[in-house]
Image (cartoon, rainbow, N blue to C red):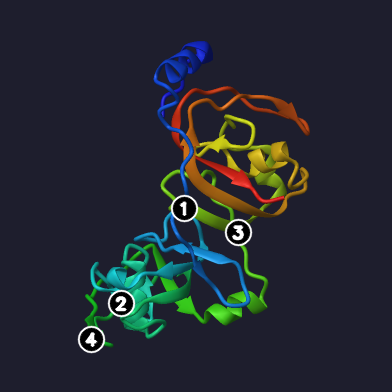
Amino acid sequence: MLRSLSFTAGIAAAVAAGLAFASGPAPALAQNPGGPAARTCPDRLTGIDSLVCNCPSEATAGGSVWGNDIYTDDSAICRAALHAGAIGTDGGLVWVHAAPGQAAYPAVTRNSVASGQWGQWRRSITFDPVEDADKQGFASVCPGSAVGLPQGPLRCTCSAEATASGLTVWGSDPYTSDSAICRAAVHAGVIGPGGGEVSVNIGAGAGVFPGSARNGVSTSTWGGYPTGFTFDR
């Protein structure tokens, strides 16, 4: 998104539009017994290396899959999870994470899913039991921003480097979804400059995102934006 140098104009436009992007309810979340709520799986594992998420039954019925147990990272997550036997056709919780690229991905028909064959690919995905994620205190590395991620909770870890650099931050809890997650987490006071684990809530946007200075981080003001995020404290 291109940023204007005139924040005042952006705010005035948002107010005149009647705060068109007012906050709304987040979608229903599936519950992971003994663990946190899981958000609906995205189509692909993009922008993050590991994710516990929920596959609705309809998501298991469509999408292309390449490989067998280890799949190309452009394979449909829920369809691949069905092929791998991680879930059935009714869907369910999966733990999907990135793996190194492979020289070849064989085509195999399994669990009524026919995967495609592919040659060398840069990055893979694979599945492990969700219970193992809980046992390991799983938290993925935070993506740079929340752009393109489904609405719902995201538990992830910020490195010290990520708190000190990255994209600009707009807002003051909530933040626009294109703000730097880890930098915003320092501003919100949920972690310090040394980093740590955060619980991010990705949801609807707001009409105005006011900037402020907190905890050594100064954020900028922005007008209406359709999606944003906050943090659990």
Name the spot of residue 136 as percent of width and height, x first: 66, 75
Viewer-nearest of labels 2 and 4?
Answer: 4
In the rendered image, which residue does mark 2 sit on? Answer: 67
Q: Residues within 10 Å of mark 1 (few under 14, many from 20)?
A: some
Residue sitting nearer the eye, 24 or 145: 24
Look at the picture and state if 30 lies above or below 198: below
- Mark 4 secondary-structure assignment: loop
Label 3 and label 2: CA atoms lie apart by: 28 Å
Compare marks 1 and 3 and give the one earlier in the sequence.
1
Q: Quadrant of residue 63?
A: bottom left
In the rendered image, which residue does mark 1 sit on? Answer: 47
In the rendered image, which residue does mark 3 sit on? Answer: 155
Amino acid found under the numbered disc labelled 2: Gly
- Circles 4 and 1, Cβ within 8 Å, touching? The answer is no
Please tell me which residue is depicted at 55% across the width and 65% down the height of the picture.
37
Compare marks 2 and 4 and give the one earlier in the sequence.
2
Please tell me which residue is depicted at 45% across the width and 60% down the height of the picture.
28
Compare marks 4 and 1 and give the one earlier in the sequence.
1
In the rendered image, which residue does mark 4 sit on? Answer: 112
Name the spot of residue 160 as percent of width and height, x first: 72, 47
Amino acid found under the numbered disc labelled 3: Arg
Residue 104 visible, this angle: no
Name the spot of residue 130 as percent of width and height, x first: 54, 78
